[in-house]
Image (spheres, coloured by chain):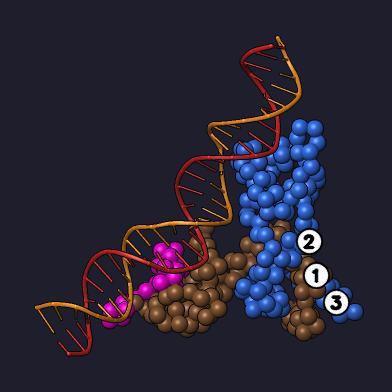
Chain colours: A brown, B blue, C red, D orange
Amino acid sequence: MPERISEAELAVMDVLWAEAPLSAMDVATRIDDGRGWSDRTVKTLLGRLLVKGVLAHEEQGKRYLYRPMVSRADYVSGESRRLVDRLFGGRAAPLVAHLAESQALSEADIAELEALVRELRS
Amino acid sequence: MPERISEAELAVMDVLWAEAPLSAMDVATRIDDGRGWSDRTVKTLLGRLLVKGVLAHEEQGKRYLYRPMVSRADYVSGESRRLVDRLFGGRAAPLVAHLAESQALSEADIAELEALVRELRS
DNA sequence: CGGCATTGATTACGCATGTAATCGGAGTGT
DNA sequence: ACACTCCGATTACATGCGTAATCAATGCCG
């Protein structure tokens, strides 16, 4: 079982996927202000992510620098698969069909999908 | 914020989306045996789903009969949107692109998508 | 009629999560 | 050298979830 990453932890991972390695404070300052988190909170999340093994830290002087141990692509794959398994019996096409039916796809999305399908076809 | 449905609760909802209304015991017997749940556990989950307002129950003699108050389609839409928002910046096409790149799409899926796109196009 | 069985309601309990505050040790300014 | 500060480590605490057990009311069996 791959270690799950919670919603709050994901915000931290997103920062480090965008730029790494970073110190704890650097991560905290890059977290979206809308979250309104204290830097203590960010530290706690970094600690939990270390324990889960999805982050590593290396000492740099007195600080630690954190970096992701799993790629964003791998994480995204896992979560996408989980959703498809839970809600669509493991089949991806119904997900797309559903998005289409529920008007979740814009004109631009559809055009993009068309190009994508053409590419997959070749 | 729509009430979230947890993983375990989803198993209960799936039973009731397939057939409703049902008594608590009927739900319990229909839950996949692989879960290994006692009927007490199912009862607890039914209770929590009632509190969340996603189930309703009507008295029938001494028992209650439970039925969903949200459609599976609505729930699935919400969860799909959450995933797309969290991981793909709200854009659906990148999700499909990702599924494609990570080999999560079979030949059949791609054919299905092609048909779907053609339909969306028309 | 009085205990047993059935079923909903209440309570339990450990782990995860969100959100911190406090403790303790290492450096820094004076 | 000492107080102050900066940072990681430890601890806190409320809520949600997974998984039940216990309590209470009610109907059934003998």
Name the N-terminal-most of marks 2 and 3.
2
Q: Nearer the viewer, residue B115 or D30?
A: D30
Report the quarter where the C terminus of chain A lies. bottom right
Q: Position of residue A71 (x, y in %)?
A: 51, 74
The chain ID associated with circle 1 is A
Which circle, 1 or 3, is nearer the viewer?
1
Numbered tag placed on residue A38 in the rendering:
none
Numbered tag placed on residue A102 in the rendering:
1
The chain ID associated with circle 2 is B
Residue segment shown in magenta: A40-63
Looking at the rendered structure, the kind of residue marked 1 is Ser
Are the two marked residues, 1 and 3, in contact with CB atoms closer than 8 angstroms? Answer: no
Are the two marked residues, 1 and 2, in contact with CB atoms closer than 8 angstroms? Answer: yes
Numbered tag placed on residue B120 in the rendering:
3
Are the two marked residues, 2 and 3, in contact with CB atoms closer than 8 angstroms? Answer: no
Q: Position of residue B95 (x, y in %)?
A: 68, 74
Tell me how far mark 1 sits from mark 3, CA to CA. Answer: 12 Å
Query: Do we see residue B44 in this rendering?
Result: yes
View extreme (right): residue: B122
